[in-house]
Image (cartoon, grey):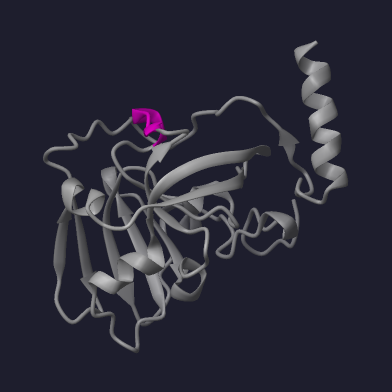
Amino acid sequence: MFDQNRRKLEDEMKSAGRLPPGQSLTLRFPVLHYGPTARLDKETWSLRVFGLVGEEKVFTFHDLEALPTTKVVADIHCVTRWSKFDTAWEGVLFRDFLEQLDVQPEAKYVIAHAAHGFTTNLPLEVMLDDDVLIAYKYDDQPLDIEHGFPVRTLVPKKYFWKSAKWLTGLEFADRDRLGFWEQAGYHNEADPFKEQRFAGRGAF
C-alpha cells in the first residue's frame, strides 16, 4: 500500500512537471553526506561573513533568530536521484540577510563554507531568488543534526548538494571557485531539470 501511494503521487508530480528527469519521489528524507556528521552547539555556533564586504561580520545563532523570518515550501532534488515534495523550511531569506551587510558591487559569487572544510559555490544572482534561505527549521522544528543543525542553506532550484549543511561561513567573491563536490566532478550549475549532475555532461 505504501509503495502504491508513493507511485501514485510520483505520477502526479510527473504530470504536473515537478519531477525532474531521472528522479524518483521519496516520502522519507534520506540522509546523505560525505564524511562524519558535524555536531555543532547552537550556543557557540557562529556564521562568519567575509570577502567582498565592507566589513567582515560574525553572526551568532541568536543574531540570526532576531532577523525577519521567512517560511518556504519547496521541492528538493538530490543528485542521487530522489526528490521530496512540499518540504517546509524556516529561516532568514538570503536577500533579507544581505541587508545586514555592505556587499561590494564587484561581488558576483557566494561560497558557502561548512563544517569539515566543505564548500559549495553559487552565483549571487541565484542566491537572491525568493526561495533561498539561511534555514534553521524544517517542518516547524529545529533542523535534525543529520540535516544540518543548527543552520544550513536552502537553494531548492539546484541539486541538494548546493544547499550546505552545518553552515559556518559565507564568502563573497568576484570570481567563481569550485566547491567540494564541484572539484570532485559534479556539475557547476546543478539544474535538476537539465540533469546537470556531472561536469562535461548535459545528462547522465
As drawn, the residue found furthest toward the top would be 1
- State the image coordinates of residue 46 (x, y, percent, origin top left): 17, 50
Q: Which residue is drawn at 57% across and 39% down?
A: 87
Q: How many labels does the image show?
A: 0
Q: Position of residue 175 (x, y in %)?
A: 40, 80
Looking at the image, residue 147 sits to the left or right of residue 185; the answer is left
Q: Is residue 60 left or right of residue 160?
A: left
In this view, the residue in front, 47 or 51, is: 47
Q: Which residue is depicted at the point 62% across and 61% down?
A: 199
Q: Closest to the observer: 55 or 190?
A: 55
Residue 133 position within the rendered picture, expressed as x and y whole percent measured from the top left: 42, 55
Give the extent of the magenta segment.
Answer: 141-147
Establish if 70 lies above or below 173: above
- Is 189 placed above or below 195 here? below
Tell whether 181 sits left or right of 83.
left
Q: Residue at x 32, y 36 (%)?
A: 149
Does the segment drawn in magenta span residue 143?
yes
Magenta stretch containing residue 133, yes or no?
Answer: no
